[in-house]
Image (cartoon, rainbow, N blue to C red):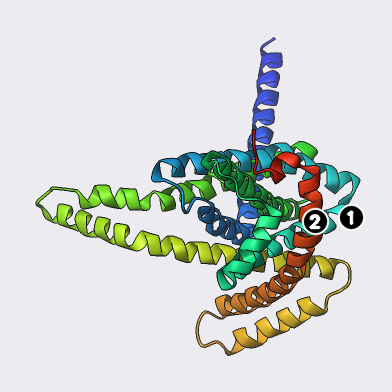
Amino acid sequence: MSTGLLALLDDVAGLAKVAAASVDDVAGQAARAGVKSAGVLIDDAAVAPRYVVGFAAARELPIVRKIAVGSLKNKIFFLLPAALALSVLAPWAITPLLMLGGAYLSYEGTEKIYEALFPHEAHEHEAKVVPKPADPSVLEDRKVAGAIKTDFILSAEIMAITLSAIPEGGFWSRAAVLAIVGVGVTFVVYGAVALIVKADDIGVAMAASRAKNLLGRISRGIGRGLVVGMPHFLKLLAAVGTAAMVWVGGGIVVHGLEEFGVDGIEHVLHDASEWVAHRAPVVPGFVGWLVTAAGSGVVGLILGALLIPVVGRIVAPLWNRLSPARASGGAH
């Protein structure tokens, strides 16, 4: 009897060790996959704040929360099962779908640049694509929907990178890694976005400190710096976010073309990056990345510029015709 009990306890201990090793393995894979997707994660964090700029301060955190919830739904309910299903049933479809997403990012980013350079023509194009609503709540809903749509593309890239970084294994372990990365990335990105958009309010509170000691003086100095600097920082971040959409979109398309054997652009960017990096006096890795990002951005700009008239003259009129409520300004 005692021997049987000891054997049972030994089996339980063995199972616990296996389970612990499995959990540790999943956590390790999630960490490694998260590091590999860090570049897209940073782009996501740079893109998101521009959807909050222009709204009342009281609406900033609710908007960030809406986008974060939508992002989490994107990853867990749509992208995770889709990634696993496609990897098993139709792995050939992953690259074309990512390329479509890259084309969309290129279009969105190029449209923002077009708007900055040619505001009148850009407003005419935007009026064709999405008529401006009179109701501020409808405008907010559209901004949130646009942010979630853009997040979907960036999240798809993150999930694809994560899936490629996971070694072949069981279905549930792969699903667990994808879920951990998806949830972790969402909290990191939108936690950072929430801090960024509310930093000026934090600065106001710090500047109002009445403490007479050194700590109080430092707090007031930092607070005033935040109040003065954050509007400029948000503008800079919005510009970086727009650039990120273009270079990430162009990069996705370039890598997709390479998958289909059209690797000329990829080779040119790689060779240019290597050539410049080897001659850089400092941080050659970063300099090489800048060259690759700039080249991908040029590809994204060209693709986006080609898509703007296509969307304005063909896609948008057809879409608005099929969506009467959207064409009438989003009336409920």
Q: Can you give x and y, in whole percent of width and height, for residue 311 in the image?
A: 76, 60
Quick one: 195 or 10, which is closer to the camera? 195
Number of residues whose C-alpha sits closer than 10 Å to that of mark 1, classed few (under 14), some (14–19) or many (20 or more): few
Residue 28 visible in the picture: no
Identify the residue at image location x=66%, y=54%.
Answer: 154
Residue assigned mark 1: 92
Quadrant into which the C terminus falls: top right
261 or 123: nearer the eye?
Answer: 123
- 34 vs 215, left or right, is right
Give amino acid for label 1. Answer: Trp
Where does the image place residue 303, in percent across and percent down from the top left? 75, 70
Q: x%, y% of residue 52?
A: 49, 50
What is the C-alpha distance between the residues marked 1 and 2? Answer: 26 Å
| Cβ–Cβ under 8 Å for marks 1 and 2 | no
Q: Where is residue 251 in the image (x, y as percent from the top left)?
A: 71, 68
Q: Which residue is drawn at 68% across and 30% down?
A: 14
Q: Which mark is residue 318?
A: none
Q: Which of marks 1 and 2 is nearer the N terminus?
A: 1
- Give residue 67's quadrant in the image: top right
Q: Residue furthest top?
A: 1
Number of numbered labels in the structure image:
2
Residue at position x 53%, y 50% in the image: 189
- For badge 2, the amino acid type reads Val
In which quadrant is the N terminus drawn?
A: top right
Work out whether 77 lies above or below 308: above
Q: Can residue 1 be seen in this view?
A: yes
Please tell me how crowded label 2 is: few (under 14), some (14-19), or many (20+) other residues with Cα within 10 Å.
some
Q: What element carries label 2?
A: helix
Residue linked to disc 2: 315
Quick one: 76 or 313, which is closer to the camera? 313
Query: Against 134, is 296 above or below?
Result: below
Which quadrant of the figure has residue 298?
bottom right
